[in-house]
Image: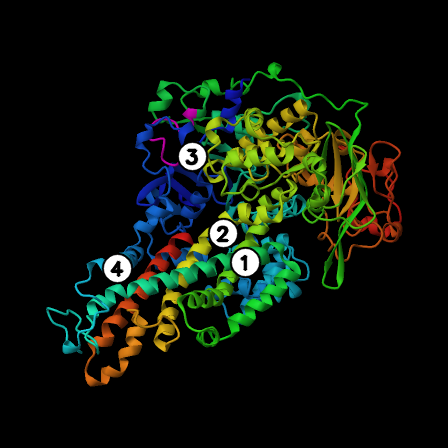
Amino acid sequence: MTAPKSTPALELRDLSVAYRTGGVELPVLRGVSFAIAPGETYGLVGESGCGKSTAAFAALRALARNGAISGGRVLVDGQDITNLDPAGLRQLRLSKVSMVYQDPGRALNPSMTVGRQIAEVYEAAGTRRADALARAEAMLAKVRIPGTGRVMTAFPHQLSGGMQQRVVIAMALAKNPTLLVLDEPTTGLDATVEAEVLDLIVALKGEFATSVLFISHNLAIIERMCDRIGVLYAGSLVEEGPGAELLSRPLHPYTMRLLRCLPAAGRRKSDGRLDTIPGFLPPLGSIQTGCVFAPRCDFADAVCRTVAPPPVRIGGQTARCHHIDLATTLRRAGPEAAVPAPPTVSSDARPALQVDGVSKTFRVGPHALRAVSDVSLTLLTGETLGLVGESGSGKTTLARLLLGLTAPDAGGTIELDGQKVAGQAKRRSRADQKALQIVFQNPDSALNRSHTVRHLIERSLSRLAGLFGHKRAERLAALVSAVRLTDRHLPMRPRQLSGGLKQRVAIARAFAGDPRVVICDEPTSALDVSVQAAILNLLAELQGGAGVSYVFISHDLGVVRYLSDRIAVLYLGRIMEIGPAEDVFNGPHHPYTEALLSAVPDLADRHRGDKRIRLSGEMPSPLAPPPGCVFNSRCPRKMGAICETEEPTMHTDTGHAIRCHLPQDALGRRGGPPPPERAASRSHAAVPA
Amino acid sequence: MTATSLAAADGGLPPAAAAHADPAAEPFATAPSRAARLLRSPSFMVGAVIVLFWVFCAVFGPLVVPHDPYGDDLLNTLAPPSAAHWFGTDQIGRDIFSRVIVGARPILSVAPLATLVATVAGTTLGLLTGYVGGWLDSLIGRLIEVLLALPLIVVALLVLVALGPSSSTVIGVIGIIFTPLIARTVRSAVLSERSLDYVSAAELRGEGALHIMFVEILPNVLPPILVETTVRLGYAIFTVASLSFLGFGIQPPSADWGLAISENYGMMTGGYWWTVSFAAAATASLVVGVNLVADGVQAVFE
């Protein structure tokens, strides 16, 4: 079956894995088969809980203590490792397979220097200590770490997240493995850092000729990185095939629906609702017969519920579906015409929130950390302002300032409907408190796990809306149905709800007092794609009904674009650009915005190729921001000395303001020419457009 | 686009919604509750049986004992264990078996009350220092450290000497001595809760500090408080017995175990082992029983 020359680096044959909890076997993977050819990158996608990581651990025979391979075989480089003894397993992990985990901070030993940790890999393979250290340093250079000598003696916590992940990749590649498993390697990283790490993986793959199993929930990243893609759903591989074909012509209804949940590039809330996948991921092992997707599938019939679909091969693609012929006709989730488009912001809308010159300085020992610096913005009634920026840019601090959870520095003002509000929430009047509410990023943290859904919402109704008795009960019923919860959710506690439902409770709570402004702090980043779409739909709908304004914080530019009327881009606590969403996206835009947009892989924008802009270096410490323009240390369009000495002012003449010395026509725009190489821009004073 | 179709987008309970397989064929739906896990823990069950035995003795002891535990029998002093007196008799002929059974009452009223005092005071202090923080935290934190640095029994003795021995003084003293330990545990649990967003959400609703501490945070820190309380109860029993032995705790003619050991340990050298051994064994078994319960609780709640 396998020719000797092309033995797959990894082959799973009808692999089943089960976990034992409380005396019960839970099947996590069922009959998964795929093979990764030498030098190939194989992507495994799926939503959380579908078995991606289990597949990775099974490939390394590193399952958790209560997990076991219950059927099928795992072959690495032609060797059957399903029943390998501990000595053989050690040999396998020593030389043939390695893994890169999601969180590099936890994958590295905090009490060992980076150099020692990498050297260990060589020493385990029998290299002498001095040689091992030298080879470790050479390996660091290969993962493009500048100043390898310094990094060798550094401890992991002294490195940034991106650098840590490079070190983990260096360790993984040190033994020149046949198979490299990457489990969500960039999920915890910022967009610009993520782009760099992905570039690095692509480059290293060429140098090391390693086969890669790449696991991610992000379809765009998978599309960019992988030759072949497998789609996992509820422990079954529902579809697999060559990357480009699978994503442009998916065969399985699940793949198709998953792709449609993403806000496509340029799609706006006024264009209508996003598609969702009705129903839920079935609990482990609940579906014993038939197709795992049948309960949520439009085409499911009696056959689907009783007979497990056989793999059907079309071209290079394989899908497990009884109705492959129907898949291409998959209709949208809801009739679009029936959806009232949210009203666009009327031209005479009054400002709901006005922020003028607000700053926040934290004291870190003897130093002053300026987390938010002189931010001014206006939010109209019914408008959504998107807040974008990398971690450490001050997005969350700004949100906390607006809410009054953090007191601002003296000087700035926050006005609500023209009335100045107190800096701290506890000093604010009840009217101000109920007017400014928040939906937090993580509903597990935001909802008190000891309280029932009923208590959580009722308490807000009493405190914020001042309602009691049957008036409160009426309002509760209205609110619960507005966020698409039902009465049977009321007596439940948060842990009994799925992530999406929890977020709905949090949204209901924020809307209890008819707020003027709701701050949404990454409300969908903890959710799966299909649930994210449902929550975005809900937010858009509530806004249309209540005329509420949103400050929408997100690192996902597609999501921000879908929901936002205007967008503000933050860097080191300063607004670098603010303007109507379309103008910010299409340009002319600030060089930082340009880099951010360029860093994000986009499914709809396949052929951008090498036009990507990569920011050099890391975000400077907010303790010591660069003089002049704070972005000058990384700016690909830096003009020259003026950028280092003078802080640019905002061009505020139009509705679209940019904090840059460059004239409008020299700024980048969508589809426009990329900035010149950084080395060239340094030697010349000005860069002509 | 009805409400129900939208609710289905991610609505409903996961187990109830999707499965088309027979719901009865889902044996794995929920993890066993904490109570069920406690009942399956061998150490908890053994400990609970021991503790419940002594609780029974404390409550019903006087009704079931074969002899009057306080009645002397001067013709039958220091009799070794026999059919008539299973554990023998003491210096003035009192039945030791009856005294051991009845002796559970003083220790099982004083020690739990002392632990309760410490739990209430310690939880309040822990919530205050953990939630309010700032100078209050620094001040109370220093006081707690000072209290923890003092040797427990010595402080208790000094207070009892000053105030005179009585059950209520013992409860108060042990309560105060154990308060800092519980406060410290509660404070660290509160600190990790305070950083969660539900506390911010409560502040944004304009909730007062008392509501946030006792309604929002307290229910979430109950498990560590429960664990700490059961552990402390074991120590409290030991401390009460020690104080009685030293003569500053429960006073004669009570049948208290510590007191019994104190009154009779001089007789050991004469070969009258039964006057001391049974009271000592009773104390030990109660402490061991409480500690086994604490182990079980700790394993389930932490």
Label 2 belongs to which residue?
B221
Q: What amino acid does circle 4 point to?
A: Cys
Label 4 belongs to which residue?
B57
How crowded pointer 3 is (Cα within 10 Å; few <14, some 14-19, many 20+) is rated as many
Q: What amino acid does circle 1 point to?
A: Gly
Q: Position of residue A484 (x, y in %)?
A: 54, 26
Q: What amino acid does circle 3 point to?
A: Ala
Q: Which residues are magenta?
A: A283-295
Quick one: which residue is furthest to the top in this view?
Answer: A337
User: Circle 4 marks a residue in which chain?
Assistant: B
**Labels 2 and 4 share a subunit:** yes
Number of marks in the rendered image: 4
Sequence-earlier tag: 1 or 2 = 1
**x 22%, y 67%: residue:** B69
User: Circle 2 marks a residue in which chain?
Assistant: B
Q: CA distance from mark 2 to mark 3?
A: 35 Å
Please tell me whether the stretch drawn in magenta is mainly helix, strand or loop: loop
Above or below residue A32? Residue A408 is below
Q: Are marks 2 and 3 in contact (CB under 8 Å)?
A: no
Quick one: which residue is furthest to the bottom in this view?
Answer: B269
Q: CA distance from mark 1 to mark 2?
A: 10 Å
Q: Are marks 1 and 2 in contact (CB under 8 Å)?
A: yes
User: Circle 3 marks a residue in which chain?
Assistant: A
Label 3 belongs to which residue?
A234
Residue B126 is labelled as: 1
**Labels 3 and 4 share a subunit:** no
Q: Nearer the viewer, mark 2 or mark 4?
A: 4
How crowded pointer 1 is (Cα within 10 Å; few <14, some 14-19, many 20+) is rated as many
Q: What amino acid does circle 2 point to?
A: Val
